[in-house]
């Protein structure tokens, strides 16, 4: 499969991207090349795009996340930069996404199969199936009441088994629970 080349005329149509947070100074005193109806501002460069926005995640037909450590923002808005090569096609029907623990946030997040961090051990899923797995992972990692239905001696061992199974197999959560002690 050939990678689509994204640029200022098409990056905003059905794409996935992780923007890296940058300091507000990168866009200060610059005029945006485009301002969306929701107020997000875009500044184009030869290498990529700066986005100044108060909302990240779903943006129209796109899945755009902001990777940030900084608290630099203005009225709740933050600036992110993405290279044109950081954009990947997105849709609801193809198996484009995998789940792994982010080295950056240390939480389970979804990533695109064309990202360099993809490994064959990860199961690819559609966007809807990926959201379902992420909800299950959140429950497994933040709650304990689910564990009373699985005979075990070590909660962390059960968690790790279920998490690994959800990320690297097509087994459902009920199947993994049944298989734990067998």
Image: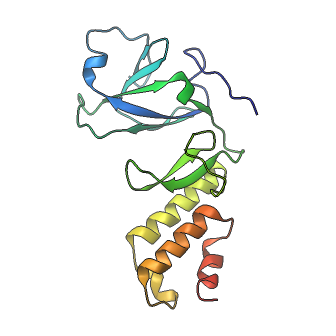
Relative height, residue 122 to residue 3 (above, below): below
Quadrant of the rendered image containing residue 155: bottom left
Q: Is residue 130 left or right of residue 159?
A: right
Q: Position of residue 38 (x, y in %)?
A: 41, 25
Residue at figure coordinates x 62%, y 52% from the top left: 128
Residue 40, visible in the rendered structure: no
Left or right: 104, with 168 as reference point = left
For the question of whether residue 31 can be seen, the reply is: yes
Q: Nearer the viewer, residue 119 or 24?
A: 119
Residue at (49, 24) in percent of width and height: 83
Tell me which residue sits at (57%, 23%) in the image.
Answer: 11
Q: How many marks?
A: 0
Residue 158 image position (x, y, % from top left): 49, 79
Q: Quadrant of the C terminus?
A: bottom right
- Between 90 and 107, which is closer to the camera in this rendering? 107
Q: Position of residue 162 (x, y in %)?
A: 54, 73
Q: Quadrant of the N terminus?
A: top right
Compared to 19, does 104 lie above or below?
below
Instruction: Judge left or right: residue 84 versus residue 44.
Output: right
Residue 135 in the image: state x and y as whole percent: 50, 61
Residue 33, compared with residue 65, is above or below; it is: above
Residue shown at 51% from the left, 91% from the top:
151
């Amino acid at each position: 499969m050939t990678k689509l080349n994204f640029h200022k005329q098409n990056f905003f149509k059905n794409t996935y991207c992780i923007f890296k947070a940058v300091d507000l100074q990168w866009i200060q005193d610059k005029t945006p090349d485009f301002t969306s109806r929701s107020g997000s501002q875009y500044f184009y460069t030869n290498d990529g795009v700066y986005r100044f926005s108060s909302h990240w995640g779903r943006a129209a037909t796109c899945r755009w996340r902001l990777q940030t450590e900084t608290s630099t923002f203005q009225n709740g808005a933050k600036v992110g930069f993405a290279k044109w090569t950081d954009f990947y096609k997105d849709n609801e029907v193809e198996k484009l996404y995998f789940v792994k623990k982010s080295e950056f946030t240390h939480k389970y997040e979804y990533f695109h199969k064309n990202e360099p961090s993809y490994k064959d051990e990860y199961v690819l899923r559609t966007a809807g199936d990926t959201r379902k797995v992420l909800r299950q992972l959140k429950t497994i990692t933040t709650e304990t009441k689910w564990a009373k239905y699985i005979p075990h001696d070590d909660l962390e061992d059960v968690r790790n088994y279920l998490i690994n199974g959800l990320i690297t197999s097509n087994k459902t959560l009920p199947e993994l629970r049944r298989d734990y002690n067998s």
